[in-house]
Image (spheres, grey):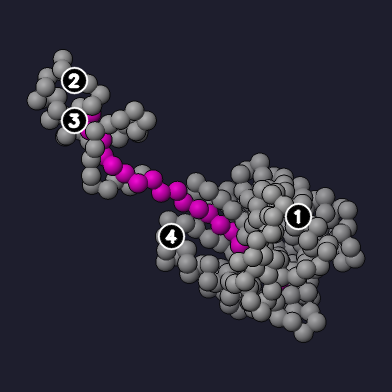
């Protein structure tokens, strides 16, 4: 709650943020016996809810495969988002995670230097780290923004070994990744996905992800990431933007 400096008579439903000096003036003028709820004076305030965001950036090998650089546009979007939040929404917080065979947080200052490697796509590790960071960040609202061009193809086993399967939607990898989505839903964290490819298996995975967390999915391209299709899997609608 941020006070605006203005006051008003209290009405039913208003928060009882009493302005003590003004209320005491009413009491002094009318006496305690003549008081009613209309004599209570409250401070006007604006409620500001902070948003905590973790941006997950896919830096697997497919992001530069077939001669198309998908990673550089993805980084530009992440950097633009950071600038927007810092300048327009100073109460909000944003952090960045790169995911590949595993996942790690990257400071904003180092994000422009990040590179794609010969990696698979461990989406589960990225989502797990994002949930951990959001718990530490706090905030009234939380969200995960996932920027990717491929289905999950890697998984960290309990032994620490990286299990990889780039062929199709591996049932084990898919199940473990969707478990993370279920945990995010329980924690009130929607996952909004920007897809940089139209691969059927990616679409199928993102559809499940969106349905579980009630997040949104956007289909775009590296050449014009500002133009996208909103794939509303919940309402079965497609909207162009």
Q: Is residue 234 magenta?
A: no
Q: In the image, which residues are magenta?
A: 40-59
Residue at 23 percent across and 44 percent down: it is 6
Residue at 77 percent across and 84 percent down: it is 67
Tell me which label, 1 or 3, sits earlier in the chain: 3
Q: Contact (CB < 8 A) between labels 1 and 4?
A: no
Residue 190 on image: x %, y %: 63, 50
138 vs 224, left or right, is left
190 vs 170, left or right, is left
Residue 82 on image: x %, y %: 51, 67
Along the line of sight, the residue nearer the viewer: 115 or 86:
86
Q: How far apart are labels 1 and 3 at the CA level?
A: 55 Å
Tell me the quarter of the picture where residue 206 sits: bottom right
Mark 4 = which residue? 89
Mark 1 = which residue? 207
- Local packing at callout 1 (Cα closer than 10 Å; few below 14, some 14-19, many 20+) is many
212 vs 20, left or right, is right
Mark 3 = which residue? 23
């Amino acid at each position: 709650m941020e006070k605006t400096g203005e006051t008003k008579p209290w009405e039913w439903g208003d928060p009882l943020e009493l302005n003590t000096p003004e209320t005491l003036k009413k009491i002094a003028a009318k006496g305690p016996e003549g008081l009613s709820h209309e004599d209570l004076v409250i401070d006007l305030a604006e409620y500001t809810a902070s948003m905590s965001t973790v941006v997950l950036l896919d830096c697997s090998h497919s992001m530069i495969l077939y001669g198309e650089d998908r990673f550089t546009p993805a980084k530009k979007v992440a950097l633009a988002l950071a600038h927007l939040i810092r300048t327009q929404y100073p109460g909000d917080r944003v952090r960045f995670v790169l995911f590949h065979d595993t996942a790690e947080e990257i400071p904003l200052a180092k994000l422009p230097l990040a590179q794609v490697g010969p990696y698979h796509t461990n989406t589960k590790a990225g989502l797990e780290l994002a949930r951990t960071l959001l718990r530490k960040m706090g905030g009234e609202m939380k969200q995960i923004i996932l920027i990717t061009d491929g289905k999950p193809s890697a998984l960290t086993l309990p032994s620490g070994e990286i299990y990889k399967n780039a062929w199709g939607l591996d049932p084990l990898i898919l199940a473990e990744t969707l478990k993370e989505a279920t945990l995010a839903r329980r924690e009130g964290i929607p996952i909004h996905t920007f897809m940089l490819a139209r691969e059927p298996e990616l679409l199928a995975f993102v559809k499940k992800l969106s349905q579980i967390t009630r997040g949104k999915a956007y289909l775009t391209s590296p050449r014009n990431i500002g133009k996208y299709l909103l794939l509303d899997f919940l309402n079965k609608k497609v909207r162009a933007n």
